[in-house]
Image (cartoon, coloured by chain):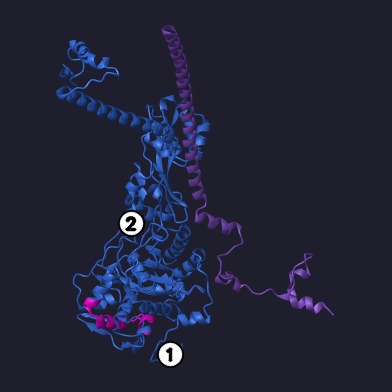
Chain colours: A purple, B blue
């Protein structure tokens, strides 16, 4: 009884120490991995910050204005070009209806449809 | 014997355990069948021992529980977060002594200031094999220093030499690809302002140690330092696009009129957010250390000026609100007014009786002085104080001046202050005063930090809703028929007031050194923004016929600015001839001159 207890204790002790040893090494490896990842993360964050700063620099209103003036045929918007509400839009003119020139079927104003009937 | 079982110091006398065991034996032997009852002092001693045991085990239990909890907390709930850049700066990951600093954004989250790890190029000259060739190659990449200077440093034979601080990432890569031995990169954090001079005065700048030296960088220095590690950021109320529009137009005006400086402000009339603040000349905060004092001077907040006729807005609001005169009333402006040793004259003298709208529209000094005279000195002081014209504005910038009050504020001062002389205020104060007048009469506290939605702010009424409505009609009148015609931006219902003041030079007013300003609000039916343009010492040119009044210099700037920024700010243009609009801004001029009465 006493002997089996001693032996099992020894076996247990050996087992546990091996397990612990193994665990400890595994943990060290994982910590190393974590450090590498953290470093990579910080480097990535820094890269992002540099790119953000660069984006902000490249999209300065001043630069955009120069580029727009040089390459686009756009002018500052005039008040009459802005329609604030849907009701500001003019009604569709029936005589220049796009449907007359386009093959796509478009709904037509009731007056036109009725007028075609005999 | 049991009495000897004492909770004394452990391991005292070697013989004690023996004696104790012997002493305990009677209890050990005691089986359940046999019950031993102890009485008197013995029982008491055992009870004491038990109580002490219980307390001790409780204490240990608490300790171990706490340790287990902490263990679980540490292993499971902590240390799992993503590291931040500040961690690295603090030395936990890669080392480095520099300190993080939170970034600054504009109201639309456009980056204005950020800390970047930048490389600086140094050299160990004694290791560089061919200094001449190296200097030539480096000079091709770096704009400064010059090739000769680089060669001098590389050829010095010293053990260490700085070549260039703060390389851009591209430059660093190019230098790296040269593969010259003996060159080295050192890394440090540097504050970068991608927009350069565009937001110079509000941002201010930071020195090489990353300490704020001016502007919000200085005001929020501690906050920016502390919140860096927790990913904090500072959101300003500025809108970079509005800022550019007003700076662009001001630069044009400065050039056109050969002015020495200019100020532009755009202010939200409801919550006092400063959407734009420009002071020309300005500087690049990336190299703020090299800027001259004149460039670093923020005219918008640190400069105080006698604003001239724009103050008549306050005088009219004061008189109308106090009820000393109504919109149909008026004063006689036939002859110049004598006060003490001063003579108050009108620039565009009409030499007749003027109604209140006419006084404001033609910017009559005599009329304004008479309006203030009726209210009295005390009333004026009290009104100006409520309007915030007598206190330092509480904006989040270190460079803010208190207004310059007159040495004594008597009858004469009351009359001159009525048309903007004798009381010097900063342009920001003027803009917030006008915002207060047009927004329904609630005091506006300017801020350069974005207000979060629904954040309450003190809204103390200064003038009544009715007076505010009357003032809006008056300001609209100035643009429609008065001195501010050039500030019109069709569709946006601009209203405003011109101000042309002579600068005091050596105790006298100099006719050629003017401060011209135009302060406007739009759209006048329900004002949303105040726009102020001020030009320092404009000179007349051929296009203006040699004149340099505010209506010719500052008003056009405001008109152009509003045309540019209104679509950006989501202000819808309206039909200015619409019945409802005309009615909302209708005003009876009540002129006694038949020609004027017709419109």
Element assignment for label 1: helix
Residues in magenta?
B358-379
* Residue B392 vertical placement versus B89 (above, below): below
Chain letter for the residue marked with disc 1 in the picture: B
Q: In which quarter of the image is the N terminus of chain B?
A: top left
**Residue A115 position within the rendered picture, expressed as x and y whole percent measured from the top left:** 79, 79
**Residue B203 position within the rendered picture, expressed as x and y whole percent measured from the top left:** 38, 53
Which of pointers 1 and 2 indicates the residue nearer the eye?
Answer: 2
- Residue B388 appears in view: yes
* Residue B50 vertical placement versus B549 (above, below): above
Which residue is denoted by mark 1 in the rendering?
B597
**Most foreground residue, B122 or A40:** A40
- Look at the image and say whether residue B359 sits in the magenta stretch: yes
**Residue A108 position within the rendered picture, expressed as x and y whole percent measured from the top left:** 75, 72
Looking at the image, which residue is at 53% across and 58% down?
A65
Q: Which of marks 1 and 2 is nearer the N terminus?
A: 2
Which residue is denoted by mark 2 in the rendering?
B396
**Is the same chain shared between marks 1 and 2?**
yes
Q: How crowded is mark 1: few (under 14 residues within 10 Å), some or many (20 or more)?
A: few
**Most foreground residue, B295 or B112:** B112
């Amino acid at each position: 009884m006493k002997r089996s207890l001693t032996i099992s204790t020894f076996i247990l002790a050996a087992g546990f120490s091996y397990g612990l040893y193994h665990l400890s090494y595994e943990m060290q490896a994982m910590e190393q991995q974590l450090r590498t990842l953290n470093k990579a993360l910080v480097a990535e964050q820094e890269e992002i910050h540099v790119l953000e700063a660069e984006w902000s620099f490249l999209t300065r209103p001043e630069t955009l204005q120069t580029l727009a003036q040089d390459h686009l045929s756009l002018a500052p918007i005039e008040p009459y070009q802005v329609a604030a509400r849907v009701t500001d839009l003019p009604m569709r003119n029936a005589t220049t209806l796009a449907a007359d020139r386009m093959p796509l079927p478009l709904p037509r104003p009731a007056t036109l449809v009725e007028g075609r009937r005999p | 014997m049991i009495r000897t079982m004492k909770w004394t110091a452990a391991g005292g006398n070697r013989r004690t355990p023996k004696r104790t065991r012997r002493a305990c034996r009677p209890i050990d032997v005691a089986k359940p069948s046999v019950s031993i009852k102890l009485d008197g002092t013995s029982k008491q001693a055992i009870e004491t021992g038990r109580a002490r045991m219980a307390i001790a085990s409780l204490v240990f239990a608490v300790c171990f529980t706490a340790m287990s909890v902490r263990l679980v907390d540490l292993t499971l709930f902590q240390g799992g977060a993503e590291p931040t850049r500040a961690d690295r700066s603090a030395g936990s990951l890669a080392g480095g002594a520099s300190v993080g600093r939170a970034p600054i954004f504009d109201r639309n989250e456009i980056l204005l200031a950020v800390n970047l790890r930048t490389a600086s190029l140094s050299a160990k000259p004694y290791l560089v094999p061919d200094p001449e060739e190296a200097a030539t190659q480096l000079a091709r990449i770096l704009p400064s220093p010059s090739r000769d200077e680089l060669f001098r440093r590389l050829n010095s034979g010293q053990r260490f030499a700085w070549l260039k601080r703060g390389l851009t990432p591209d430059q660093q890569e190019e230098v790296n690809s040269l593969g010259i031995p003996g060159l080295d990169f050192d890394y440090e954090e540097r504050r970068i302002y991608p927009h350069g001079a565009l937001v110079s005065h509000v941002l201010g700048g930071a020195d090489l140690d990353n300490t704020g030296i001016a502007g919000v960088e200085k005001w929020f220095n501690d906050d920016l330092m502390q919140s860096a590690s927790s990913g904090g950021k500072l959101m300003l109320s500025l809108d970079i696009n509005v800022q550019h529009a007003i700076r662009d137009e001001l630069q044009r005006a400065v050039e056109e009129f050969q002015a020495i400086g200019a100020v532009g402000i755009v202010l939200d009339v409801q919550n006092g957010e400063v959407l734009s603040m420009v002071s020309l000349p300005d500087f690049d905060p990336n190299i703020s250390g090299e800027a001259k004092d004149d460039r670093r001077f923020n005219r918008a907040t640190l400069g105080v000026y006698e604003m001239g006729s724009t103050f008549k807005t306050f005088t009219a609001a004061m008189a109308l609100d106090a009820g000393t005169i109504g919109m149909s009333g008026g004063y006689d402006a036939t002859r110049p007014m004598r006060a003490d040793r001063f003579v108050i004259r009108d620039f565009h003298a009409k030499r007749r009786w003027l109604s209140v709208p006419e006084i404001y529209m033609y910017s009559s000094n005599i009329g304004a002085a008479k309006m203030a005279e009726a209210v009295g000195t005390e009333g004026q002081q009290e009104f100006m104080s409520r309007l915030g014209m007598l206190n330092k504005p509480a904006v989040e910038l270190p460079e803010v001046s208190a207004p310059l009050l007159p040495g004594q504020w008597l009858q004469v001062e009351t009359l001159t202050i009525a048309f903007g002389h004798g009381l010097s205020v900063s342009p920001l104060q003027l803009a917030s005063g006008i915002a207060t007048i047009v927004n329904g009469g609630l005091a506006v506290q300017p801020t350069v930090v974005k207000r979060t939605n629904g954040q309450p702010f003190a809204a103390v009424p200064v003038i009544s809703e009715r007076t505010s409505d009357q003032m809006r009609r008056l300001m609209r009148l100035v643009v429609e028929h008065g001195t501010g015609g050039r500030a019109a931006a069709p569709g946006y219902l601009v209203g405003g007031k011109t101000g042309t003041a002579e600068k005091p030079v050596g105790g006298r007013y100099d006719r050629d050194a003017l401060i011209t300003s135009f302060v406007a609000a739009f759209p006048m039916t329900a004002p949303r923004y105040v726009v102020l343009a001020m030009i320092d010492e404009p000179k007349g040119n051929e296009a203006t016929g040699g004149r340099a009044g505010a209506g010719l210099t500052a008003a056009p700037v405001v008109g152009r600015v509003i045309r540019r920024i209104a679509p950006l700010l989501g202000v819808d243009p309206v039909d200015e001839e619409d019945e409802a609009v005309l009615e909302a801004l209708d005003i009876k001029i009540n002129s006694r001159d038949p020609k004027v009465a017709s419109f």
